[in-house]
Image: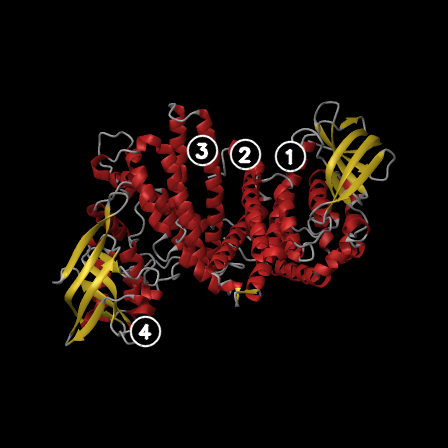
């Protein structure tokens, strides 16, 4: 049993933390959100230079061979800085599918360019009708190698070069396909998310596509597990930021002639936030190391982590705003944006109820 | 980053499990499983079985019977005890006075007390709280005045667990009422419960049991050789107990055992129709919810165990307080689930609430409510959960 980071992991943590602190101050972020596409393209290039875009890819494919722990380290720091870059969609989600399912040729055609920051993927699987968190494609259909349908909530879809799209094949199974985002028949409508992210609705009308072999629903499931593990870590970073901002505020804000930190009711609330943060951190670690476990264990462990983290995210986010008082609900101040990102994390890739039901259906965690 | 126990630790777990399977008497296992009271004889018998195996006082210094275990081994041992439905460590002897004697006692005190304390030949109780001194323990008033070779003790202690069985009491007493700070006038005394002037009066608690007591001291003469360490330094010695041993605070094994028990019991009750399918479904979801809480707590406890072994990563700040608060919340949640399972059949308290009515087939049914009631104590004793939050606010958050 060892919860220590290796020297390399500590180095990674320091370098990402420094990058976020230097390049992603709250004012920088506000400025970037106002740019076309809602972000500064220079940041993505800088991430490529730092090697962050190659983190989870195999060394043989031109990546750095990082695992769940490395992604956790990076995402926690991103969470602290409310980083809005499409790392989760382009690197974690799409990267998992590429690494697990794509052929050698398909990987060779993409990964080096992804790592260099020249090629960005997004994964389009959610559909406007049907169960919200389903991974099997229903209304999007593949006829041969051509796709028709509509996808919603495509993270990072607005400026992706290429999409991985799920579609129902002629045999009724779910397949995954590469689709060139610039191909005729592809229309992408991007919108700003309340958390600073960008999401897209993608319509496909008889669009040429390239199949990724295998069971698409299974590949998606695994990619979503990786994304949820990453989100748990991001939430831990955001909650840590929320707690830091809140305790700082409690010490400086004066009412009745004293810092409000002297009031026991507020002290205890802050301690409850800390406890939720620490329990969530334990579960984020659990999720990260579970990515290497057999499928059933992996699914159960990550579902459990998401339940704990989603509930903690709600509590810490809400209480951070509450303890800030009126300033907590102003757009000019960071804490409200932390709350909004935590809220998005709650619902992305299955909320607490969804994962609690899923875990109940499989009989709970392994003994 | 690796959450698995080592092969050596797994082998140790197997060794403990094998021992418990062979040596834990059925009557004790059943009483623990049903959450009915253990008799004094059962508690003593079990301590002596452990002592015969060399596992009565694992955390003590090796020359006094300690096992030299790593934090992970201590954690595993405690977890296996609970999972096997063995009694928990007898903390007054094992976790409190034993370590105090070893750290601060004289050679004569060690020679006199340690071996019988390990074997439970001497049963200790703890005299800290007083009617006017609970969370503000340092305000305690029981006085000890030096008179020749003795101290003369007058005052009252309260919530003294199992004092009715105790041979000795370790007590905090005020020896300097004029000290500049209340903490600086307190001494740590060992007092023979057979001394003239001691009266033990039972306190009936809401579970209708007799576990805690009031202990009155009326001109009780205590030989000065029974002082621990230096006069007026008792507060420092008592503080040594706080957060000193962090491997078992959250009582993970205890809650794990209750979770398993609740799953099994719910399945039986669903099978014979006492739970409707809808009730069973809801219970299963509640149990998974509790299981997730428990897993988060377990991993947080393991982060502390790893930190204490030098493999901690960041650890968790003020871990002892956090583990105490969340651990007790989970323990209490499990008692709520036990109450849900019992339903109206749990209303009757046969045999005055001691659950020894053999006519009741499911003995746990009559023990569920008393257990639920008594377990409210866990968030009150040992520094209430509110005091724990005060500690965390001050030491970690700097508020």
Q: What is the CA distance from the residue labelled 1 to the residue labelled 2?
A: 12 Å
Circle number at residue B74: none
- Residue B201 in percent (x, y) is at 18, 53
Q: Residues within 10 Å of mark 3 (few under 14, many from 20)?
A: many
Q: Residue at x 19, y 73 (%)?
A: B145
Is B344 placed above or below B133 here?
above
Q: Secondary structure at mark 3?
A: helix
Residue beneath disc 3: B283
Is B334 placed above or below A143 here?
below
Circle number at residue A357: 2
Q: What is the CA distance from the residue labelled 2 to the residue labelled 3?
A: 12 Å
Q: Residue at x 81, y 32 (%)?
A: A204
Q: Secondary structure at mark 2?
A: helix
- Residue B305 in percent (x, y) is at 45, 56
- Residue B84 in percent (x, y) is at 34, 42
Q: Secondary structure at mark 1?
A: loop
Evaluate whether label 4 is on the same chain as label 2.
no
């Amino acid at each position: 049993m060892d919860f220590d980071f290796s020297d390399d992991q500590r180095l990674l943590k320091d370098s990402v933390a420094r990058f976020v602190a230097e390049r992603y101050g709250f004012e920088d972020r506000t400025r970037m959100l106002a740019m076309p596409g809602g972000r500064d393209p220079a940041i993505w290039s800088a991430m490529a230079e730092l090697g962050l875009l190659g983190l989870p890819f195999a060394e043989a494919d031109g990546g750095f061979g990082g695992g769940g722990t490395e992604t956790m380290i990076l995402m926690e720091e991103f969470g602290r800085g409310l980083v809005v870059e499409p790392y989760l969609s382009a690197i974690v989600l799409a990267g998992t599918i590429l690494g697990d399912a794509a052929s050698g040729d398909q990987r060779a055609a993409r990964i080096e360019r992804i790592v260099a920051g020249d090629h960005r993927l997004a994964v389009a699987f959610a559909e406007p009708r049907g169960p919200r968190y389903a991974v099997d494609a229903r209304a999007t259909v593949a006829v041969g190698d051509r796709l028709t349908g509509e996808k919603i909530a495509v993270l990072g879809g607005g400026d992706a070069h290429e999409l991985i799209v799920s579609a129902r094949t002629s045999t009724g199974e779910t397949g995954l396909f590469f689709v060139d985002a610039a191909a005729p028949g592809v229309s992408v409508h991007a919108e700003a998310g309340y958390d600073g992210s960008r999401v897209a609705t993608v319509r496909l009308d008889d669009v040429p596509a390239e199949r990724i072999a295998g069971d698409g629903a299974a590949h998606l499931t695994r990619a979503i597990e990786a994304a949820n593990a990453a989100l748990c870590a991001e939430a831990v970073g955001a909650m840590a930021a929320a707690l830091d901002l809140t305790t700082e505020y409690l010490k400086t804000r004066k009412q009745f002639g004293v810092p409000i930190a002297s009031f026991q009711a507020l002290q205890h609330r802050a301690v409850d936030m800390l406890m939720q943060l620490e329990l969530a951190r334990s579960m984020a670690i659990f999720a990260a190391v579970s990515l290497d476990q057999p499928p059933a264990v992996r699914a159960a462990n990550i579902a459990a982590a998401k339940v704990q983290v989603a509930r903690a995210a709600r509590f810490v986010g809400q209480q951070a705003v509450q303890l800030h008082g009126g300033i907590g609900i102003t757009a000019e101040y960071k804490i409200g944006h932390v709350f909004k990102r935590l809220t998005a994390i709650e619902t992305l890739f299955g909320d607490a109820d969804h994962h609690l039901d899923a875990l109940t259906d499989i009989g709970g965690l392994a003994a | 980053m690796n959450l698995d126990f080592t092969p050596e630790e797994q082998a140790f777990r197997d060794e403990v499990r094998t021992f418990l399977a062979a040596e834990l008497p059925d009557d004790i296992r059943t009483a623990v499983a049903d959450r009915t009271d253990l008799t004094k004889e059962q508690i003593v018998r079990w301590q002596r079985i452990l002592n015969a195996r060399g596992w009565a006082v694992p955390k003590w210094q090796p020359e006094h019977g300690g096992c030299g275990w790593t934090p992970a081994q201590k954690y595993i041992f405690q977890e296996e005890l609970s999972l096997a439905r063995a009694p928990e460590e007898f903390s007054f002897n094992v976790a409190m006075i034993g370590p105090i004697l070893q750290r601060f006692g004289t050679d004569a005190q060690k020679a006199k007390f340690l071996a019988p304390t390990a074997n439970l030949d001497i049963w200790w109780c703890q005299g800290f709280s007083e009617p006017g001194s609970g969370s503000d323990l340092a305000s305690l008033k029981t006085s000890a005045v030096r008179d020749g070779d003795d101290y003369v003790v007058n005052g009252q202690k309260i919530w003294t667990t199992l004092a009715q069985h105790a041979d000795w009491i370790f007590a905090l007493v005020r020896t300097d009422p004029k000290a500049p700070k209340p903490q600086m006038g307190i001494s740590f005394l060992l007092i023979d419960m057979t001394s003239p002037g001691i009266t033990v009066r039972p306190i009936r608690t809401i579970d209708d049991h007799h576990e805690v007591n009031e202990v009155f001291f009326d001109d009780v003469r205590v030989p000065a050789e029974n002082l621990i360490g230096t006069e007026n330094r008792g507060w420092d010695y008592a503080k040594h107990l706080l957060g000193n041993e962090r491997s078992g605070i959250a009582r993970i094994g205890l809650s794990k055992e209750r979770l398993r028990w609740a799953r099994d019991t719910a399945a039986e009750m669903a099978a014979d129709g006492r739970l409707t399918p809808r009730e069973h479904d809801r219970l299963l979801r509640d149990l998974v919810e509790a299981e997730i809480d428990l897993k988060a707590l377990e991993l947080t406890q393991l982060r502390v165990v790893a930190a204490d072994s030098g493999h901690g990563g960041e650890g968790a700040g003020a871990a002892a307080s956090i583990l105490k608060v969340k651990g007790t919340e989970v323990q209490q949640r499990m008692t709520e689930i036990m109450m849900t399972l019992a339903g109206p059949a749990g209303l009757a308290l046969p045999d005055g609430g001691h659950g020894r009515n053999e006519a009741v087939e499911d003995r746990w049914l009559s023990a569920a409510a008393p257990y639920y009631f008594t377990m409210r104590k866990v968030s009150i004793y040992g520094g209430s959960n509110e005091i724990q939050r005060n500690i965390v606010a001050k030491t970690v958050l700097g508020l």
